[in-house]
Image (cartoon, helix red, strand yellow):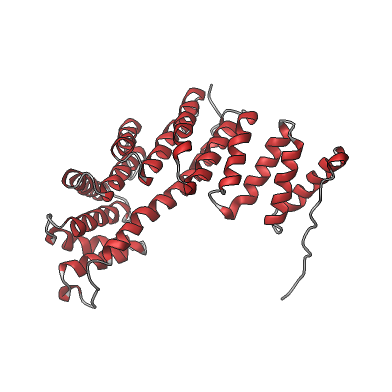
Amino acid sequence: MLLNKKNKVMNCHFYRILRSQARSLCFGSMLGASLLVGCGGPEASELSVEEQVQAGVKALQIFDFEQSREILLQAQPKVDVSDETLWTLATYSYALSAWHDSPPVEENVLVAKAALQELIERYPQSLYASCALIDLGRMAEIKDFPHDEPDVETARDYYRQVIQEFPNSDMAVRATLNLAQTYAQELEESSVRQAIQLLEERLPNLDSGWVGLYAQYIAQLYAFYLKDHDAAIQPYLKAVDAGLPRASDGDVSLWQLGLLTEDVGQAMTAARSYAKLIDAYPRSVYTTVARQRLLAIAEQNPAAEITIPELPETTFGR
């Protein structure tokens, strides 16, 4: 069964969320490590190796990949490989800057891969090793430069390696999401169910910060890939209770939940979702239509005595 290819948009939406969370994990570690290696000075020639590495990391943290790559190209080879803290920081940062520098070219990607693989070989249990495995998976999974060919099976092997070697880490949580996504994007029913299984197996053991993301992704896969609205309800409710992964578009999620629960005949659940949308997002584009649906549910269920939130007053000027 081939599913609607428009669902790739939803898959990309979830990748953006998990990518931002995972980036904060590795970048947070980079920031912490950079604080241990001294302070930067005005001229690169006057800086110690440690200070040069810190300068490269700072450039990377503001997404100046070109400057970061240029600095770390000179600094990374000078770092003593026996200094795990500094060497892993310099090597991982150099790999990221080479990978993300623009325009993307094969040479830079090969440099990044080589640096990440060396890091994994020298310090296989470091946090940066788990990040490096994730990044190698993404390099295999996506097209980085013209004529680059994605290799999804290799990507899956990297993600599974993270899960096996760092089973209780946040990076394993992210690797599971990435692995599930590789199956979901095939848009075949059996593959989507395999993605759901991966997510559901890890969900009970997640820290609270990940529950909303996992639960909502499961709900979206059921609802929009498999068209199984009944199965989508409980994970969607779990996501709302745990905290939706992106509060900025929580109104969209509550609107979707309301429609899904109405569709399966759970009018009271839909009413609560619409009411929460109105209260939490009073100026959302969905607020008016959510209130209209809430009024209709209240009219059809007078015994429920549903409270209808008022819409905010609209004023002009300051």
Front position in the image: 126 or 16: 126
- Quarter-of-image position of residue 202: top left
Front position in the image: 310 or 316: 310
In the drawing, does residue 150 fall left or right of residue 284?
left
In the drawing, does residue 15 fall left or right of residue 63?
right
- Image x and y of residue 128, in percent: 27, 50
- Quarter-of-image position of residue 77: bottom left
Which residue is drawn at the image coordinates 58% and 54% (left, top)? 247
Tell me, yes or no, if residue 286 can be seen here: no
In the drawing, does residue 212 fall left or right of residue 45?
right
- Image x and y of residue 276, in percent: 70, 50
Tell me, yes or no, if residue 197 can be seen here: yes
- Image x and y of residue 164, in percent: 31, 35
Which residue is drawn at the image coordinates 53% and 49% (left, top)? 245
* Residue 172 higher or lower than 88, as above or below: above
- Image x and y of residue 205, in percent: 44, 38
Check the image and name the residue furthest to the bottom: 42
* Residue 91 higher or lower than 231, as above or below: below
* Residue 67 higher or lower than 285, as above or below: below
In the drawing, does residue 313 fall left or right of residue 139?
right
Q: Quadrant of the C terminus?
A: bottom right
Which residue is drawn at the image coordinates 11% and 58% (left, top)? 80
Which residue is drawn at the image coordinates 25% and 46% (left, top)? 129
